[in-house]
Image (cartoon, grey):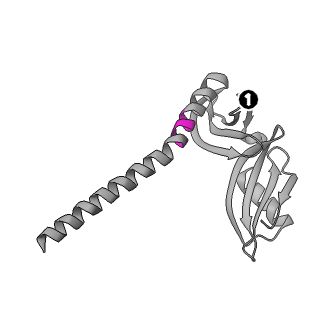
Amino acid sequence: MKKWIFIVSIVIVILIGIMVNVYLNAVEPIKTAKEKAENIAIQETSLVTMTDFSLYNGSYTYYVVKGLNEDKEEIIVWINEEERTFTERKVSDGISREEAIQRLYEEKSPEKVMRVQLGMENGVPLWEIYYRTEKNLINYYYVDFKTGEWLRDIQNL
């Protein structure tokens, strides 16, 4: 009986080790992208301190970095991964996440907002809102970061 407990324990430890290895290998590209984006943003823009990072995959992949400039103003930097171009805006120059969600609720009737993230399409900084309807259909709603105006939506996926 003790032999079986020992064997089962060894198998569990090996399985946990494999799962940890898979997880670490899965998050490594995101960690690398975050470090790359932070370095680029600090070298090429007025960003001094990074406070947040996200990836946006639209027509192009963008690294979206939030942080502070030398004047302690909150800024956002969109970095086009492929073309290595940058767009920098003050947070105060655009609408907030909450205002973008409010815009969605003025136009649509989402059952649940799943994710809200910054992105860029055709050179326009935007908020991408991923939500589900009461029929559990996937929808995307895009709001202009600067003006808060509706840009486009993709419905019923």
Q: From the image, which quarter does the N terminus lie in?
A: bottom left
**Residue 8, position as x, y percentages in the image:** 23, 67
Q: To which quarter of the image does residue 77 belong? A: top right
Which residue does the image show at 33% across and 58% down from the upper left? Answer: 16
Q: Can residue 103 be seen in this view?
A: yes
Q: Is residue 9 left or right of residue 97?
A: left
Q: From the image, which quarter does the C terminus lie in?
A: bottom right
| Residue 136 located within the stretch drawn in magenta | no
**Residue 106, position as x, y percentages in the image:** 84, 65
**Residue 116, position as x, y percentages in the image:** 69, 55
**Amino acid at the residue labelled 1:** Glu
Q: In this view, does 56 lie to the left or right of 124?
A: left
- State the residue in front, 69 or 87: 87
Give the residue furthest to the bottom: 135
- State the residue in front, 98 or 151: 151
Q: In the rendered structure, which segment of residues is drawn in magenta? A: 30-35
**Residue 64, position as x, y percentages in the image:** 66, 40
Q: Is residue 70 visible?
A: no
In this rendering, is residue 40 above or below 15? above
**What residue is shown with label 1?**
83
Which residue does the image show at 29% across and 56% down from the upper left? Answer: 14
Q: In this view, does 31 lie to the left or right of 7?
A: right
